[in-house]
Image (cartoon, coloured by chain):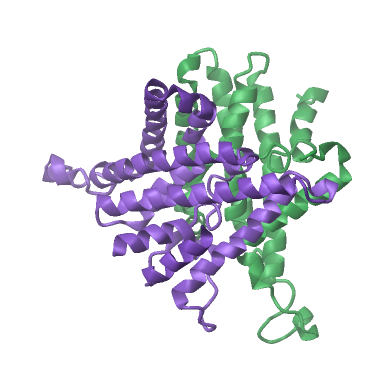
Chain colours: A green, B purple
Amino acid sequence: MASKKNIDLIKDPLWDNNPITVQVLGICSALAITAELKASIVMAVSVMFVLGVGNVIISLMKNMIPSSIRIIAQLVVVATLVIIVDLTLKAFMPDLAKTLSVFIGLIITNCIIMGRFEAFALDPNNTPLQSFMDGIGNAWGYGLILVIVGFFRELLGSGTLFGFPVLGDPVEKTGLYALGYENNGFMLLAPMALITVGLIIWVQRAKNKSLIETH
Amino acid sequence: MEYLELFFKSIFIDNMVFATFLGMCSYLAVSKKVSTAVGLGAAVIFVMLVTVPMNYLLDQYILQPGALGKWLGPEFADYDLSFLTFILFIATIATMVQLVEMIVEKFSPELYNQLGIFLPLIAVNCAILGGSLFMQQKEFHNIAEATVYGVGSGIGWFLAILAIGAIREKIRYSNVPPALRGLGITFILTGLMAIGFMSFGGMLTGGDDEAAPKEEQSVATDGSKEEENATVYINQTEEVK
């Protein structure tokens, strides 16, 4: 359970082999829903569920799936899990489900999931438990970037975290706003998500020189 | 006229890449050279052209609450199959991509070899599924509108990948900080291009200062509310070219 390989499976994708910033997978949803921290966390948890459970299912079924139809088989497994997530969200968090709208459906085409199925769960050397670890690990890495981006966008864009004002009240001019600080509404708009991720990649590669690309 | 409006709107204002971040993975992975970018972009336009109207029909006659009643008889009107949306849409897309692959291989082996691995990749390109899901959300009145929307979104994606491909070919000669090379600078460039594309949204209000800034969710969900002037877009297209 806690052998070195299993720990690496969970730890590696968090930073050094991050699915978003290093493998360049699953970017669409990562950018679109990060204007609020809460939505980012719900999205990260949903992906963690789909990836963890899906990896185990595919790993258990790998000897039964003919390789010629494996893509369709994988899509059906993912689509089923995503329907579960979608209906659960609609039942328990209807407001948030509206904000996330089609992006929950787009978990199906999130390339991290197909990528992990293809690269890890279908590999005959990996046990279902290891596949589970791998799924959770990659979802962690994905979630980490989502949370970082969501944190900065919500903090700088609307001065709140999880909807609670943390920088003071912009109307009453208390806290930081008393010093003349203004919310940067631009952070809530689409382009700043891209630029924030670009900056994260910059920081990451400045610290870890081995990741630097030639061009 | 409203078709023209919808067409330009889906290309520029609701641009798949810059407004809703769809299809980013292949957009980043395949945009190193203009030639491959053009091949993938063309394939995406074609698949969008086919799948969006097909999924529109599926949505109208099978998935919507009460849709079965339209053609199977009133006793089926109570069924709500909308929970099957994802599976049916993705099955259509996977089938169509497979079909397109076979047709292209049969009739134009050259093009097939050029596109190679990118063709099957389209099945998991979220722009395609996203196009169908947004189509469902927008509640178009007839299949022609859905088709125009599909083609427009495809062309929007094509323009985006073409533009970033061209920039990435040139940026090789620039002095980018080492840690930012490759992926980092591409993200930032896409962000800057997205800022440029946001100005197309500003045309809806005629550049009025009092207009409230749009949030991305509203771009994604209720982009069809505002009225706009199609002739303005036509002028703007010339500039983009």
Height in image: B4 above or below A116?
Answer: below
Q: Quadrant of the N terminus of chain A?
A: top right
The answer to whether residue A37 is visible is no
Q: Is residue A83 left or right of residue B116?
A: left
Quarter of the view holding residue B57 = top left
Residue visible at 68% across and 51% down in the picture: B187
Residue visible at 79% across and 39% down in the picture: A213
Q: Is residue A103 left or right of residue B83?
A: right
Instruction: Name the foreground residue: A150 vs B190.
Output: B190
Quarter of the view holding residue B58 = top left
Q: Is residue A177 left or right of residue A60?
A: right
Q: Is residue A19 left or right of residue A33?
A: right
Q: Quadrant of the C terminus of chain A?
A: top right
* Residue A178: image location, x then y, percent: 77, 85
* Residue A174: image location, x then y, percent: 75, 84
Instruction: Name the foreground residue: A82 vs B39.
Output: B39
